[in-house]
Image (cartoon, helix red, strand yellow):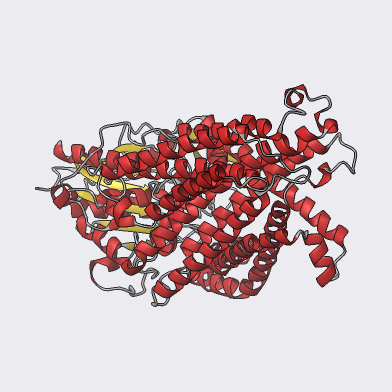
């Protein structure tokens, strides 16, 4: 194809980052523009009328995807409670680049994700069956003044359990219903297979995940109902091990075993969408599990054997502790696999190749914290009007007490390590920042000293991002240890007893710490809920809170089917389709991606046919492609992928980065102006560093020095317009000098 006839034939398509900016903000076409001052107090003028053009007369267009991960308030709130599932799903995409570990890592991640579903059911069953049906309904003082419970009070235990088993069954159905919506509600763009990059990142959006999600959903629903069956059968088996009980236990165990086996065979479960045989198998398994639950409930209701009296629901605590022990074992196995198969090159992945383990451990830690808090808050509600001594003061299972203790211990030690990291790394970070400031602003006037200190401090803080590696590893290890220590609950011991006996810390202090940890968990959950609401309603607030949702829901559901739907399955094909259309109309496209938008545009470029890529140029700013994504997702964003992106656009690519940016950075070479690049070939021309701020002295037209931009977009800076001009020339013709920068 020939180059564009003029710069007017070029469309600059801007893709924003996780800030979820409005379309006007992305395009820079607000009604007013700040001409002096800062965000606290400044001077504004009406924006000049620029029609729809940007630098050098290119046509401006924006793709706004910010509401795809959030949608309605209800969905945003759902993200808070589905957060453990989302983290477990992200973990499977953080696997090492070594293909030899793919099958084992996928299998372990999916089984660990299944344990989260099992924990979800056990938590609801703990409320409905243990706290309400078994304990509260057997105590007249607990039922006093609670007509919504007293109608079942005094009834046989089998009837109480059978009726309230409907609560966890309904919870499973609700989760099934909420996540049983197709992720694709539009006609996606599909480039010819031979023209799409074979690299894994190129499959995001191009690959239809719905068949896999449907199979995983059926498996998780089957396991969820089987978990409810295990809880009921364990209680029944304490006094009645009849042939019926044993047969149902064997059938339930078989269902769970089949679920695990299916998840441990990625080549089978990841089969193409056209292979529907496995879909039928998983749906049949789900149907069998539902029917089995109906039979188990009927068996519990009709069984004539007497039930034990007092204590907790028989078998419940042992089942819960067994789950925590299984999670610990799986985490250890995953850590061994990751260390065994990790990339041995230096500075390839921080987290020592343990990114998957860190996120899975975080998801499990959060899930057990959610579960423990649910149990404790309901127990507190039931116990608040009951005099001490009737047995309700120790309603929650001991395993949950150990969970809260483990969570509090992990958070406390992690905060201590964080403080030590800040202190230990402070000198080195500030020394490096001082050298950067000295090079950027040689011979500054004396009055600029306070501003220079601010710049140095900003750069030093930005460099702390790399120091979070050991912090994440420490937390994951402590989280795994926390689930392991729950097994001590089987010895009928509480943390306060063990610590006082072995360490000498008074039991009251430990009990206070556990209670405080419980309220910390409650505060975290409340903060996430408030953040979800304000993040949806308030754009500035979303800049901070919405980051978690936007990053977590970028990856398709491949580990946990109850995770929030992936918006990249729409955003990437939508971008590819729009670019293809613009090129087919005779335009060239200047694709601009800020922050996480750079990841979206990189995935999009890999899906463009060669004849379209020949008319595309690329600008990335504040890009976390190498600094974060390349390290956390090494199998999907690595040197091969980044070079493929550059090759597909003919190396018409400029990456703008700042030292003050804590998120984005250089992609191929972190050299400064006037320094040689660290790489050879066309990749050496990609990275361009921006000095930030532009100056440290107050200009005559202003009352404050130029602001420190950090991670903010740089479309208004001269270096951005220079990059536009360079890319216009490389797209086919020099930019029109009469249509200069706006």
Q: Quadrant of residue 697?
A: bottom right
- Residue 538 is situated, as x and y percent measured from the top left of the image, at 56, 34
Does residue 137 sit above or below 36 in this rendering?
above
Could you say which is closer to the camera, residue 693 or residue 449? 693
Does residue 711 sit above or below 25 in this rendering?
below
- Residue 710 is situated, as x and y percent measured from the top left of the image, at 51, 55
Could you say which is closer to the camera, residue 112 or residue 305? 305
Any part of residue 63 in sight = yes
Any part of residue 547 in sight = no
| Image position of 107 (left or right of 416) | left
| Image position of 476 (left or right of 89) | right
| Image position of 450 (left or right of 71) | right
Could you say which is closer to the camera, residue 482 or residue 655? 482
- Residue 313 is situated, as x and y percent measured from the top left of the image, at 70, 44
Does residue 540 sit above or below 353 in this rendering?
above
- Residue 377 is situated, as x and y percent measured from the top left of the image, at 73, 40
Hey, which residue is sitting farthest left in the picture? 1
| Residue at image point 78% right, 51% down | 516
């Amino acid at each position: 194809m020939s180059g564009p006839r003029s710069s007017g034939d070029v469309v600059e398509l801007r893709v924003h980052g996780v800030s979820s900016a409005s379309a006007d903000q992305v395009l820079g076409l607000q009604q007013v523009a700040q001409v002096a001052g800062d965000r606290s107090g400044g001077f504004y003028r009406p924006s000049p009328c620029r029609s729809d053009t940007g630098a050098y007369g290119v046509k401006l267009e924006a793709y706004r995807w910010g509401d795809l991960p959030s949608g309605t308030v209800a969905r945003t709130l759902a993200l808070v409670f589905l957060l453990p599932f989302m983290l477990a799903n992200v973990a499977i995409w953080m696997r090492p680049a070594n293909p030899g570990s793919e099958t084992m890592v996928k299998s372990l991640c999916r089984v660990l994700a299944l344990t989260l579903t099992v924990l979800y059911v056990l938590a609801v069953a703990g409320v409905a069956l243990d706290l309400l049906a078994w304990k509260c309904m057997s105590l007249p003082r607990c039922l006093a003044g609670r007509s919504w419970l007293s109608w079942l009070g005094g009834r046989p235990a089998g009837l109480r359990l059978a009726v309230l088993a409907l609560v966890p069954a309904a919870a499973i159905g609700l989760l099934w219903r909420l996540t049983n919506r197709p992720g694709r509600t539009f006609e996606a763009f599909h480039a010819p297979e031979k023209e799409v990059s074979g690299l894994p990142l190129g499959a995001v959006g191009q690959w239809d995940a719905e068949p896999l999600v449907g199979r995983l959903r059926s498996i998780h629903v089957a396991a969820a109902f089987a978990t409810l069956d295990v809880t009921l059968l364990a209680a029944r088996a304490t006094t009645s091990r009849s042939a019926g009980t044993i047969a149902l236990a064997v059938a339930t165990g078989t269902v769970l075993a089949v679920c695990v086996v299916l998840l441990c065979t990625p080549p089978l479960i990841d089969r193409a969408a056209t292979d529907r045989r496995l879909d039928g198998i998983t749906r049949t398994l789900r149907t069998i599990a539902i029917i089995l639950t109906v039979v188990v409930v009927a068996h519990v209701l009709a069984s004539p054997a007497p039930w034990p009296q007092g204590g907790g629901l028989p078998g419940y605590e042992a089942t819960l502790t067994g789950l925590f022990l299984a999670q610990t074992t799986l985490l250890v196995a995953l850590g061994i696999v990751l260390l065994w198969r990790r990339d041995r090159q230096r500075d390839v992945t921080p987290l020592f190749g343990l990114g998957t383990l860190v996120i899975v451990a975080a998801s499990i830690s959060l899930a057990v914290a959610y579960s423990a808090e649910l149990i404790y808050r309901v127990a507190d509600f039931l116990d608040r009007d009951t005099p001490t001594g009737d047995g309700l003061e120790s309603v929650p299972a001991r395993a949950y007490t150990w969970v809260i203790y483990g969570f509090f211990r992990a958070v406390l030690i992690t905060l201590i390590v964080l403080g030590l990291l800040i202190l230990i790394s402070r000198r080195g970070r500030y020394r490096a920042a001082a050298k950067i400031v000295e090079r950027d602003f040689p011979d500054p006037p004396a009055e600029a000293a306070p501003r220079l200190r601010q710049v140095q401090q900003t750069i030093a803080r930005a460099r702390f991002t790399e120091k979070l590696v050991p912090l994440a590893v420490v937390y994951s290890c402590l989280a795994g240890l926390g689930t392991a220590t729950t097994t001590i609950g089987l010895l009928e011991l509480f943390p306060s007893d063990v610590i006082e006996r072995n360490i000498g810390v008074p039991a009251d202090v430990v009990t206070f710490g556990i209670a405080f940890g419980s309220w910390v968990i409650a505060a975290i959950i409340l903060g996430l809920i408030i953040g979800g609401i304000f993040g949806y309603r308030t754009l500035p607030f979303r800049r901070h809170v919405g980051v978690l949702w936007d990053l977590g829901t970028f990856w398709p559901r491949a580990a946990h089917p109850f995770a929030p739907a992936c918006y990249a399955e729409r955003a990437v094909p939508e971008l590819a389709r729009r670019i293809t259309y613009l090129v087919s109309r005779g335009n060239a496209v200047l694709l601009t991606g800020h922050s996480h938008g750079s990841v979206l545009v990189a995935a999009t470029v890999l899906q463009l046919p060669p004849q379209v890529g020949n008319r595309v140029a690329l600008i990335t700013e504040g890009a976390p492609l190498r600094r974060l994504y390349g390290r956390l997702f090494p199998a999907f964003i690595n040197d091969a992928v980044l070079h493929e992106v550059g090759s597909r656009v003919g190396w018409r690519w400029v990456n703008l980065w700042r030292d003050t940016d804590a998120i984005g950075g250089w992609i191929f070479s972190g050299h400064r102006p006037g320094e040689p690049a660290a790489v050879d070939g066309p990749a050496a021309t990609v990275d361009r560093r921006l000095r930030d701020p532009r100056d440290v002295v107050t200009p005559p037209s202003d009352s404050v020095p130029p602001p420190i931009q950090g991670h903010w977009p740089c479309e208004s800076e001269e270096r951005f317009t220079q990059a536009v001009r360079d890319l216009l020339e490389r797209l086919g013709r020099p930019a029109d000098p009469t249509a200069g920068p706006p």
